[in-house]
Image (cartoon, grey):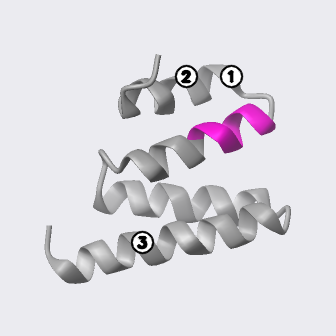
Amino acid sequence: MADSNKEKVEQLIQDGLAHHDAGDVGQARDAYLQALELEPENAKALDLAGLLCMQCGEPAAAEEFYSSAGFK
């Protein structure tokens, strides 16, 4: 992956965390998913997307993210 994409992915994850911490679930989800579009195997984005799903009462979706990240 090009350095510019890595930087974009990291910025999207940081944006997602800021929205997540502020309680803006929709914006956080969008940021995590955008990061995963650029880097589908990014463990941090997968973990955070899974956490968000668990907090929103979506355990099946969370399990998919965690499984993709290699968590069981």
Q: Mark 3 and mark 2 in contact? Answer it, CB < 8 Å.
A: no
Residue 21's tag is none
Above or below, 66 against 13 in this view is: above
Is 72 left, or right, of 16 in this rendering? left
Q: Residue furthest top?
A: 72
Secondary element at tag 2: helix
Task: State the CA–CA distance, disc 1 to disc 2.
Answer: 6 Å
Q: Give residue 34's position: percent from left, percent from top.
A: 45, 63
Relative placement, left or right, of 2 versus 43 is left
Figure quadrant of the N terminus: bottom left
CB under 8 Å between callouts 1 and 2? yes
Residue range in magenta is: 50-55
Judged left or right of residue 2, residue 25 is right
Instruction: Give the mark toward the camera: 3 or 2.
Output: 3
- Front tag of 1 and 3: 3
Q: Which residue is tagged 1?
A: 59
Name the chief secondary structure element in magenta. Answer: helix
Q: Position of residue 41 (x, y in %)?
A: 30, 45
In the rendered image, which quarter is residue 25 located in?
A: bottom right
Q: Where does label 3 land, which residue?
A: 10
Label tally? 3
| Residue at point 38%, 69% (across, down) | 9
How many neighbours does mark 1 have within 10 angstroms: few (below 14), some (14-19), or many (20 or more)?
some
Where does label 2 land, which residue?
63
- Quadrant of the rendered image containing residue 21: bottom right
Give how far apart the Cα atoms at labels 1 and 3 are: 25 Å
What element does badge 1 sit on? helix
Q: Give the structural element (helix, strand or loop) at label 3.
A: helix
Q: Is residue 51 magenta?
A: yes
Looking at the image, tell me whether mark 1 or mark 3 is earlier in sequence order: 3
- Residue plotted at (62% across, 66% down): 16
Classify mark 2: residues with Cα within 10 Å, few (<14), some (14-19) or many (20+): some
